[in-house]
Image (cartoon, rainbow, N blue to C red):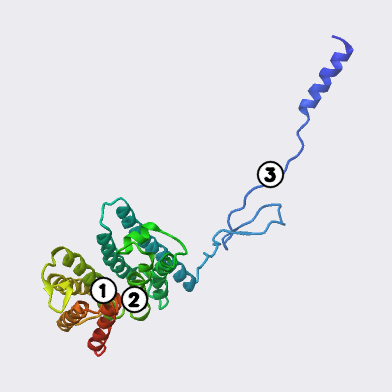
Amino acid sequence: MTLLSSHLLLFSAVHRRTPPPCTTVFRWNKPTIDGTVRFLRSPVMPAVVLDQRVAPFAVPAAAEDLLYNAGATVGVLGGAYALVRAFDELTRRNILHQGLSRKLVHILSGLLFLVSWPIFSNSPKARYFAAFVPLVNCLRLLVNGLSLASDEGLIKSLTREGDPQELLKGPLYYVLILIFCALVFWRESPIGVVSLGMMCGGDGVADIIGRKYGSIKIPYNQNKSWVGSISMLVFGFLVSIGILCYYSVLGHVQLDWASTVPRVAFISFVATVVESLPITEIVDDNISVPLVTMAVAFSLFSNS
């Protein structure tokens, strides 16, 4: 063994016996009585509170109501658009006759709108969100009726002769009545319910059945039939009572049924007589029927 190697062995042995440098080991203290934990030899670290919680973000009630009604409006508007587009497509493919498609839209769109009112909140402003749905359809009718745009499916499903200007008559009056009933009567009054029930359910069904089976005409109006008028009376009454029951179960109206049923029957009779009159060239059924219904219903229900 050389002298150099002996020195290296001696150096390595001494080096292995040298203790490692002192290291500081941090230990945890037990939690203090106030529920905190502190670090040893770390005076700059703040105490950590174990039971501290972050307060949840609270949405203001007004904003929550706004968001809810906006969502309900979008949902109902989407349903209304899908309904019209479905009948547009059925008419385009000649699956449904144009006249039948128009009347089915007349019946279903108004009744589904009426049934959708309980979806909205109990806020006084909810009626404005609901009225926005027929307002959008009103704008569509104006745009297409004034030939600012041309939606052939809409025109075919809502007009008799395919003339866009027809959209500015019966269909436009129809959506204006929907807006009026939503804003003025809403869910708290049976007046709007019965008015829409007669216009949508009664008048709509009368036209479908009258055209198919109405061979016997009314003496004072050869454009109307006995079976059509009877259908309006029966279906208008049943639809109105059915929706009133629906609203009553949900707690929106409180009615004395012993007096409500005969009142609705009388209102249905008056509306049927008005619909049978030969005044269609002067005033549209979508104006005369609901306005007369509102007047009679107001006189009967205003004191109840």
Along the polypeptide, which appears first: circle 3 or circle 2? 3
Where does the image place residue 148, in percent across and percent down from the top left? 47, 64
Badge 1: how crowded within 10 Å, few (<14), some, or many (20+)? many
Nearest-to-viewer mark from 3 and 2: 2
Does the image show residue 280? Answer: yes
Does the image show residue 79? Answer: no
The Cα atoms of the two marked residues, 3 and 2, are separated by: 82 Å
Tell me: residue 184, above or below residue 163: below
Q: Is residue 90 left or right of residue 242?
A: right
Report the amino acid beneath label 2: Ile
Quadrant for the C terminus in the image: bottom left
- As helix, strand or loop, the secondary structure at mark 2 comes to helix
Mark 1 in CB contact with mark 2 (< 8 angstroms):
yes
The Cα atoms of the two marked residues, 3 and 1, are separated by: 86 Å
Mark 3 = which residue? 25
User: Residue 18 versus residue 170: which sits nearer the camera?
Assistant: 170
Along the polypeptide, which appears first: circle 3 or circle 1? 3
Q: Residue at x 48, y 73 (%)?
A: 62
- Locate residue 45: give its quadrant: bottom right
Mark 1 = which residue? 199
Along the polypeptide, which appears first: circle 1 or circle 2? 2
- Locate residue 98: give its quadrant: bottom left
Q: Is residue 130 left or right of residue 54?
A: left
Tell me, for residue 250, which label it has, or none: none
Number of numbered tags placed on the structure image: 3
Q: Is residue 44 left or right of residue 85?
A: right
Tell me: residue 22, above or below residue 180: above
Report the amino acid beneath label 1: Met
User: Residue 81 versus residue 47: which sits nearer the camera?
Assistant: 81
Tell me, for residue 177, which label it has, or none: 2
